Image (cartoon, grey):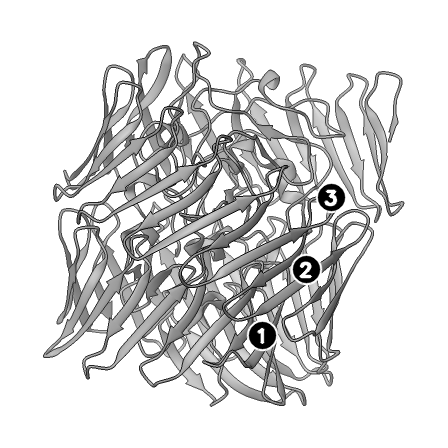
Amino acid sequence: MENNPVGQPILITNALGHATRFTYDTNGYLSQERNPLDAVTSFAYDVIGNLLSMTDPNANTTRFEYDPANRLVRITNALSQSTSVAYDVLGNPIRITDANGNATNYRYSTYYRRDLLVSKTNALSFTWTYARDFNGNLIRITDPNSNSKRFSYDALNRLVTTTDALDNTTRYNYDAVGNVTTVVKADTSSAAWAYDRNDRLIETNWLDDTITLSYDAVGNRLSMKSNNASLIYTYDANNRLVGQSEEYLATTISYTYDAVGRRTSMTDLEGGLTNYSHDAAGQLVSLINPPGQETIFAYDLGGRPTTRSYSNGTVTASLYDAADNATSTIHRRDDESIISSFIYTYDNVGNLTSELNLSGLTQYAYDAVDTLRSVLNPDGTGVSYTYDRVGNRIRMDATGVVTNYTYNAADWLLTAGAVGYTYDRNGNRISKTVGVDVTSYAYDFFDRMVGAVLPDGRTNTAAYYPDGSRLRKNEASGLTKNFAYDMGNVLTELDAEGLPTARYTSGFLADQWLSMDRGDQSFFYHEDVWGSIRNLTDINQNIVATTDYDRFGVMTRHVGETTNPFRYTGRELDAELDLYYFEGGHYDPAVGSFLSRSHHPGHKSIEELTLREVVVSTPVYVPLDVRMSLKWDPEYRKEILGGISMITVPGPNIEHAVGRKSEGWNVMSLKSIYRTTVPGTEQFSSIGGATFKAIQTKGIPVPWKRRAVVPGTSIELPKGTNDAGMLETRAVVPGTSIPVMFNPKEYDTSSMATVPGTNVLYRIKPEPVGHITLYK
């Protein structure tokens, strides 16, 4: 590293000799970052250091405006689309207006010198209210339908009960330092957690299973064992995962890395070698799988994927607008003939308004809160949707065929036309009735489906690894499928005897499927902007499968007999159940919702709270089930947070766990890292704000008593303290010692470590977030 005379880094050279250069203006603010590929990001400031503009390597400029109190009041992107925020005299954001001119209003009250949200009114004039106790703890959320969810706390302000609108109550108990020790759910099922003296989770115990964990001296997880499987992890001297073994299937996967920690190879359970190559900026440029099939990746200066070339000669090409929305994805053969083509347009906030494919033009319209209201198909048919005040779909009109939907006070779907549904007290769907045909479902403590009985009496069962991934499913047809994973993506499918039946090649991103080897044949995946698999081609570039979907995942057309589990958004289709599997939860495309409430992305305690409310309310989390909305990749541009974030880290790019570079981190608020996910594991996902980018980071251990470190940086998320310097109440993900959020107060620069190459961390304030949705 080289520094200028005042100690600011001007050159950072990594272990491979690749250099990133930084220049500063006369006031000492970072004005330019030049990466090893000579891609330049530029920054401009006012005299007191407010960031006024940021120009990315593609010459797209985002501009920022401030009021006299130096509060960010407007962000305008390179397409002149603006999001604005208004404040009260205390600096609380009271109105956020999106680029379509739709405003969400917020009202606050003061509790112990903290201004906390007491109401939110969306652009349709529907209001949620938040009642609090004397300490500011959230004790009741009342939605626009006048249904309430209640919370209670102990003397230490720790959440002890949550009660839904049907009076179903879940109870939480803690040890002396605030770790969750037991949870008793509404149906009286319970689980217990034990910790070592470093407050690391070492055991999770419930009726059906016990999970035990062990660690090495520096906190790396060495093992996770359950009744179903045992996972053993090994690390190198740099604490990088180099091996993962599973005893039940007798599988081992190993990894190697280059000098800067990027994966260079993987040896799978069959001994097959996958090699990875990266450019000087750390972007994956080549992947060669065990059959020797090379996939070549190319990017523009800003790191957006532009082409992906497969070994069968097909090429995927993508274009983007100045706001990084994917405007076209075209899959071609080597003779330039088109396999499939998708041309997209968007409104000012990034909602997809049209898709032009080889079948024709499909158009989409939205309401003021960005909920999909109508679809016009190429053949002139259409679908319109009507919603209640909280966003439940209550009517669908498909060119005169009307389906009405009803819900109870807890927003559980009861009927969809002639189809009826029932639930357990935890909110899991336990039956579906169509006429005289009944399908029933069973779940474990963590609301994962473990069994289903079809109308003809046949059964479908599932078992899970101790880290939450699905280990096995026994299908009603009699087939047993076991699964081995690489960083959350299915790597190998095995039969009942543990013999491989299919190998999948994927990129570093979740559900980034490249190819499938089944038997002696190879097939290549071609997806749309949602990551949904639209075509499969064989080694000769012939189309062997084509699938079309509606916006909620219902397959409207499928041609081809090739066995392929991955369909809508790249997720696994459990065909016998007509459901998609999303890492622990099942999604029903027919009604656009998950079967388990804990896996529903529209869960009210996330959807209707601000970031600061989540800290002091309920231990909820954004599940990995919505990971197709969380993964960051310009091919999958998706606005998932309507809130506005402060621009925080102008400076060098940050690499996440699997080595994928994301310039999006340069403009994300550090609040983005606060969320954690899977019960019983230490995996977490993060959600971005200011530019509506998001990235998923998997498998990073975040022990509670150690700080959560942003991979590849020196940023540490501090333990929560309130204004009085006392330990703040933590919302803990059930089954872990990981807080969902860290701190409700406004952070200042003294509470964070800086990123190398930055001059300062700008004001970081938890802003109200908008509607977290899976589909628009």
Quickly name the residue at label 2: 305
**Residue nearer the viewer, 332 or 5:** 5
**Residue under circle 3?**
238
- Residue found at x 18% / y 47%: 188
What is the residue that sits farthest to the left in this orientation? 436
Residue 517, numbered label: none
Question: Tag 3 or tag 1, which sits nearer the N-term?
Answer: 3
Judged from the image, the secondary structure of the residue bearing numbered disc 1 is strand
Q: Nearer the viewer, residue 589 or 195?
A: 195
Q: Which residue is mark 1?
A: 526
Q: Amino acid at mark 2?
A: Pro
Identify the residue at horizontal 41%, vertical 45% (top origin): 203
Q: Earlier in the sequence, mark 2 or mark 1?
A: 2
Q: Earlier in the sequence, mark 3 or mark 2?
A: 3
Q: Please name the residue shown 53% across and 13% down the image.
A: 69
Res 367 seen here: no
